[in-house]
Amino acid sequence: MIEREEIYQGSVLRLIPSENYASPAVRKAVGSVLMNKYSEGYPKKRYYQGQKYIDQIEELCRQRAKKLFNVPYVNVQPLSGSPANLAVYFALVKPGDTVMGMSLPHGGHLTHGWKVSITGKWFKAVQYSVNKKTQLLDYEEIEKLAKEHKPELIWAGATAYPRLIDWKKFGEIADSIGAFFCADIAHIAGLIVAGVHPSPVPFAHLVTTTTHKTLRGPRGAMIMVTKKGLERDPDLPQKIDRAIFPGFQGGPHEHTIAGIAVTLKEASTVRFRKYGQQVVKNAKVLAEELKARGFNLVTDGTDNHLLLIDLRNKRIGGGKAAIRLEKAGIIVNKNTIPYDPNPPVNPSGIRLGTPAVTTRGMKEKEMKLIAKWIEETIEKRKKLIEIKKEVASLCRKFSIS
């Protein structure tokens, strides 16, 4: 089944913006003998013997992360993005405290206080949204909500927001009410490293991120404490460490941490910067081509790696469209749009992005072709089996390593 999955990944266009291809070096590290180790604790402070090389690897990963993101402290042990965010709650607030984050149907994340998440059940969650007319973050409304509810913790970051985020404004809002500000850059970490999205580091107290998506690493996460965070609370690194272990986790996955270390080395290169720049170029071309073919894009375009398409004018739901595209070898996901009249199980939109196809080496020319296939698939202007053959032919020209 693994072999079949490998063939499948190489023969389809993976346009889900949270997916990517890790390099052979990253996969080698993750699949190494490091998976045989148990390493509860932190470097030089373990609860198991035999950690000489494990300590070196984890410390190398931390140092690379600190340098790459320009932060004074990093914890690289979170198993994924949600546990990383939960650790921030555990370190900074108590159940019942007020927190604030972006509404999930408007592009936020479950762990930013959405009602079905533990973060929406254990905390008093205030949710901000995008402007109904512009579909952009309404910073005046966010500031108004913050001053009214005075949350102890404010989250910024998104899973389905195609535009740049004004980290400085979020920092000013948090400072005005004495709140902690945590930026969740899971989707855009690679774009920040590449210099095509502004960094929240100068304005946030903490930054969380996954290590896959645009960063192209294994499925892990990091929590960063910024200089501003240290000035606010010098004990913040210790609080984060204790929240991860023993607060949420036992033994860290050191094979994954080794993969993250390799990822961070790769992300420090000029080649990676060019990759990030191409991701955005491709997304913009794909957006313009789809618009020219009559598709309605949320916010009318994109500044980053993803697009959100409102399919109501095409008279097809997001779920049905995603299934139809999969049959044509084009992989996207159904997604709610802001103020969606339909339920999440059958939303009005689809979400797609360019990180994975850009990793394969595809550029603007291929984005135009992909837009054409999406139109033909959605509007049934061509048999899906014919499109699938054309997709497979393109994929053979851009093999994955």
Image (cartoon, helix red, strand yellow):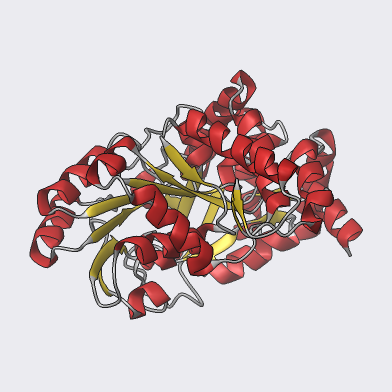
Q: Is residue 375 visible?
A: no
The residue closer to the viewer here, 185 or 69, is 69
Which quarter of the figure is the C terminus placed in? Answer: top right
Please provide percent x and percent y for residue 86.
43, 65
Please provide percent x and percent y for residue 68.
51, 30
Please provide percent x and percent y for residue 25.
78, 36
Q: Is residue 256 visible?
A: yes
The residue closer to the viewer here, 178 or 365, is 178
Residue for point 27% across, 61% down: 129
Placement of 384 over or under 76, stated as above or below: below
Q: Please give left or right for residue 225 compared with residue 17 in the image.
A: left
Q: Quadrant of residue 348?
A: bottom left
Please give the count of numbered marks on the rendered protein. 0
Placement of 68 over or under 386, stated as above or below: above
Q: Please give left or right for residue 130 compared with residue 59 in the image.
A: left
Residue for point 31% across, 56% down: 155
Q: Please give left or right for residue 32 compared with residue 192 in the image.
A: right
Residue for point 61% across, 64% down: 322
Placement of 146 over or under 231, stated as above or below: below
Residue for point 42% across, 41% down: 302
Which quarter of the figure is the N terminus placed in? Answer: bottom right
Q: Please give left or right for residue 194 compared with residue 219 in the image.
A: left
The residue closer to the viewer here, 244 or 15, is 244
Spot the residue most to the top. Answer: 270
